[in-house]
Amino acid sequence: MQFNQQVMVHGIKESQGNFEGRAFSSTTFHVEADLKANGAGRSVGRVTTPMKCGDAAEFEKWAHLPATAFPVKCDAIFEMQANGKGGTDLIMASIKPCAPDRGMKAA
């Protein structure tokens, strides 16, 4: 099952190389999420959670952004997949920056 969701991206990291003879390639997006309360204590606020999307080539689409451009509001497509353990996994299938809001006027 796929669904669209707007997310705030606070950082993007490319990872590529070889480890013990196996190649790896990914791009990790650090996406804003609500901080979950737990039994050990109270919590408020938001955190970022890492979500992989695409291989290291995905990073090239974002590499031109300066650090001051973050956080970036994005449109993402997520997939819910059964994990075979009686639960589900949330996978980021694609992501792109939101189109600028042309209706806003400069202050």
Image (cartoon, rainbow, N blue to C red):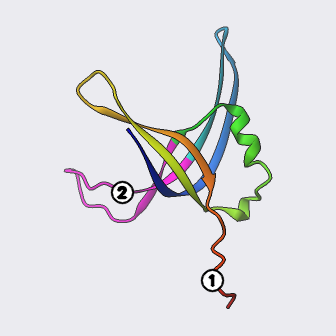
Q: On the rendered structure, is 64 left or right of 28?
A: right
Circle 2 packing at 10 Å, graded few (<14), some (14-19), many (20+), is some
Q: Residue at x 76, y 56 (%)?
A: 65
Check whether the beta carbons of the residues at disc 2 and disc 1 lie within 8 A of each other: no
> Please, what secondary structure does the residue beneath circle 1 have?
loop
Q: Residue at x 70, y 27 (%)?
A: 16
What residue is drawn where x is 24% and y is 51%? 38
Does the magenta portion include 73? no
**Which quadrant would residue 97 be assigned to in this image?**
bottom right
| Of pointers 2 and 1, the one earlier in the residue sequence | 2
- Disc number for residue 3: none
Residue type indicated by callout 1: Met
Q: Please, which residue is most extreme toward the bottom here?
A: 107
Query: Is 87 left, or right, of 9 in this rendering?
Result: left
In terms of depth relative to the viewer, which is nearer, 83 or 79?
A: 79
According to the picture, the residue beneath numbered tag 2 turns out to be 35
Q: Quadrant of residue 69?
A: bottom right
Say which quarter of the image contains residue 103: bottom right
Q: Position of residue 18 (x, y in %)?
A: 69, 17
Judging depth in this view, the residue of 1 and 96 nearest the camera is 1
Of badges 2 and 1, nearer the viewer stands 1
| Secondary element type, mark 2 | loop
Q: Which residues are magenta?
A: 30-50
Q: Report x, y in % for residue 67.
A: 72, 59
Quadrant in which the C terminus is drawn: bottom right
Name the image quarter holding the N terminus. top left
Picture coordinates of residue 39, whole percent (x, y) = 19, 50
In the picture shown, does residue 25 fall above or below 12? above
Q: What's the distance in space between the residues labelled 2 and 1, CA to CA?
A: 30 Å
In this view of the protein, which residue sits in the foreground, 15 or 55? 55
Residue that badge 1 annotates: 104
Residue 55 horizontal side relative to residue 42, left or right: right
